[in-house]
Image (cartoon, helix red, strand yellow):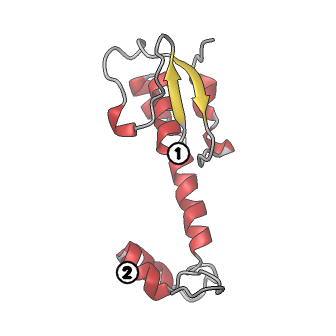
Amino acid sequence: MCCAGSEQRLTCTDQMMLFGKVSQQLCGIKKLPWSCDSRYFWGWLNAVFNKVDYDRIRDVGPDRAASEWLLRCGAMVRYHGQERWQMDYNHLPTGPLDKYKIQAIDATNSCIMSIGFDHMETSNICC
């Protein structure tokens, strides 16, 4: 798959081993020239992570939904009144929906995209 000085690129066989049936179905579509290009796969996956779910915003509140979006995309969030940064999606704080207000965001090396910015419009980020 890779040698010193050679271009690293996943072949259809490599992708099928990594991603299973989904990749197998994509690689079987010969009419689409991008079907086996991993760059498009990751772009598509980033777009899925950035998709705004307005029902989720309504159900859990804007700050919780924005926190979920940011953490899902690899960013960090700090809440008002807390010193530590929240980095793990699986350890988001629980409790009343209005208790945790986003104070700061560190999106360094994250995959947030402009299509997800609607999360921020509904959030009341405090200073």
Q: Residue at x 60, y 86 (%)?
A: 4
For the residues marked 2 and 1, what is the alpha-carbon distance in whole angstroms?
24 Å
Q: Secondary structure at mark 1?
A: loop
What secondary structure is found at the residue carrying circle 2? helix
Residue 84 is situated, as x and y percent measured from the top left of the image, at 46, 23
Q: Amino acid at mark 1?
A: Cys
Q: Which residue is mark 1?
A: 73
Decide: is 4 above or below 22: below
Counting from the top left corner in percent of width and height, residue 15 is at 45, 79
For marks 2 and 1, the one nearer the N-term is: 2
Count every numbered label the image shows and give the total.
2
Identity of the residue drawn at 59% across and 46% down: 110
**Residue type for callout 2:** Met
The answer to whether one can see residue 121 in this image is: yes
Residue 11 at x, y percent in the picture: 52, 86
Q: Quadrant of the C terminus?
A: top right
Q: Determine the residue positioned at 48% across, 79% down.
A: 26
Taking depth in this image into account, of 37 and 76 the one nearest to the observer is 76
Q: CB of mark 2 within 8 Å of CB of mark 1?
A: no
Residues packed near mark 1 inside 10 Å, few (<14), some (14 to 19) or many (20 plus): many
Q: Quadrant of residue 41?
A: bottom right
> Hey, which quadrant is residue 5 in on the image?
bottom right
Residue in the picture at 52% in, 44% down: 74
Taking the view exactly as shown, the residue that stands out farthest to the front is: 4
Mark 2 — residue? Answer: 17
Classify residue 70 as left or right of residue 32: left
Mark 2 is surrounded, within 10 Å at the Cα level, by few (under 14), some (14 to 19) or many (20 or more) other residues, namely few
Q: Is residue 120 above or below residue 52?
A: above
